[in-house]
Structure formats: structure tokens, C-alpha cells
Amino acid sequence: MFQTQSAVLFSLLVFTSLFYGSTVKAAQSLTLIQVLSDNTNGVDGLANPRSIKTKADNTKVFISSGDDNAVAVFNADKHFNLTFKRLFKNSPPTFKGLEGASGLTYLPKYRLVAVTGFYTQATSRCRIQRFTGA
């Protein structure tokens, strides 16, 4: 029994050391490229971000914001640098259902972003009219 416990312990030790080594190597290869902050340099809609989706061709990024009650749209260049484009914000009675915006999905066939609103207990759809240009 002692040999079995020793073998198991040794295996766990080897596995842990291999995993730790690969994790450290992966972390050392990360480089910070860009930070976007809410209400900084013209960016809006990032207070308490909840979900992010990217258009299949990587030209647009959609982010739901729980505290801004909004969906922010960003353009992405060929290096995936993001610039703020547009904000869909909860503003009853014309646009509602985004209070506590959380889950988000992009439906490319319909050019729609569907968003769940936690506090409004609703799902909203935002039609994205055009994906070309700045």
C-alpha cells in the first residue's frame, strides 16, 4: 500500500511540476497591447463589462455593459486594435431592455446583436446597419 501511495504522490508531483512549468512559460509570453477604459479618450459603454463577441472577420467587437446598461460597438483594425464606434444605451421609451445588460450574442445572418437585460428581465435586439467604413 505504501508503494501505491508513493507512486500516486510521485505522479501527482511530476504532473504538477509539468503543468506549473508550462503555465509559467505561457504567462511569460503575454504582452499588453491595448487597454480601453470607460469614459476615457472617448470610450463609452465599458462600465462593468459582461460579455464580448467578435464579428467572424474580426472587424467589429460588441461588448455588453451591466452598469452602462448598454452595448458598445468597436471597430477593429488588421492588428485588432480597437476604436470606439457606437453605443446602444437603455433609454426608454425608444430603446429599452438593456438595464443590467449581460449576455450577448451576434447573429451575422440578420446583422443583429441580441442582449439580455438582467434588471429589465428582457432580451433586446440591436440591428447593425452597416459594417464597412470607420
Image: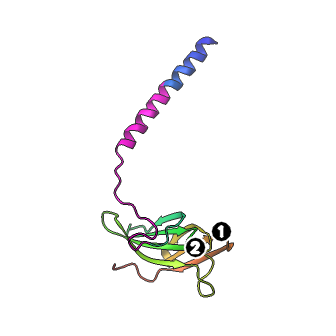
Position of the N terminus by quadrant: top right
Tell me what residue is drawn at x 58 percent, y 73 percent: 69
Q: Which mark is residue 69?
A: 2
- Amino acid of disc 1: Phe
Q: Which mark is residue 25?
A: none
Tell me what residue is drawn at x 41 percent, y 82 percent: 130
Tell me what residue is drawn at x 35 percent, y 53 percent: 32
- Outermost residue on the right side: it is 121
Q: Secondary structure at mark 2?
A: loop
- Amino acid of disc 2: Asn
Q: Secondary structure at mark 1?
A: loop
* x then y, percent, for residue 44: 46, 73
* x then y, percent, for residue 47: 52, 67
The mark nearer the N terminus, 2 or 1, is 2
Task: Name the foreground residue: 70 vs 111.
Answer: 70
Q: Residues within 10 Å of mark 1 (few under 14, many from 20)?
A: some
Position above or below: 24 against 134: above
Q: Hey, which quadrant is residue 99 in on the image?
A: bottom right
Does residue 19 show up magenta in the picture? yes
